[in-house]
Image (cartoon, rainbow, N blue to C red):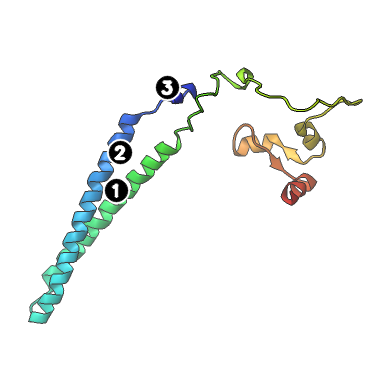
Amino acid sequence: EMLARKKFELDSAAILKIEAERKIVQAEVSSLQEERNSKSKSIGMLKAKGEDIAPVLKEVDGLKAKMQDAEGKMKALEEQLEEMLLEVPNTPHSDVPSGADEADNVEVLKWGDIPKFDFEVKDHVDIGAGLNGMDFAMASKITGARFVTLQGQVAALHRAL
């Protein structure tokens, strides 16, 4: 319900499916690693007895290749799962009113007196653009809406703060 307020639909079935696949592959990796370790120990025993270790070395190499393949699958599944989970937004607090956009925001508190000026008040966007220090058009091409690139003195001021 809280995610629906953010207009987000969680595909929990897809997340659970990927997690189940990941667990299976993880068990496979663990099993292969166990088998490889046991074969590697047997190499030492065979050497001590003076027996031929070539067939066992070949098996260990085969297990190593299978293990790397399985680890690659597991890493891909983990990345896919992380990507899906990073898309899930934070849930709003229960006291936060629902709204379609920022126009539906509720003013909770005003503090102090609003000063009166004898000149036209400009917001930071107009001031920054007037100083050629804020470029919203360039930022929207790079990252999307609601970002800005800072240049010149405005960038220096920002870094100084």
Amino acid, disc 3:
Glu
Q: Residue lying furthest right in this view?
A: 118
Q: Position of residue 104 (x, y in %)?
A: 61, 18
Q: Which residue is mark 1?
A: 73
- Tell me which residue sits at (27%, 57%) in the image: 68
Q: Disc 3 and disc 2: Cα gap in Å?
A: 23 Å
Quarter of the image for residue 111 reads top right
Q: Which residue is mark 2?
A: 18
Q: Which residue is mark 3?
A: 1
- Tell me which residue sits at (82%, 39%) in the image: 131
Of the pair 61 and 100, the residue shown nearer to us: 100
Above or below residue 80? Residue 2 is: above
- In the rendered view of the protein, which quadrant contains the N terminus? top left
Quarter of the image for residue 136 reads top right
Mark nearer the N terminus (1 vs 3) = 3
In the drawing, does residue 73 fall left or right of residue 111? Answer: left
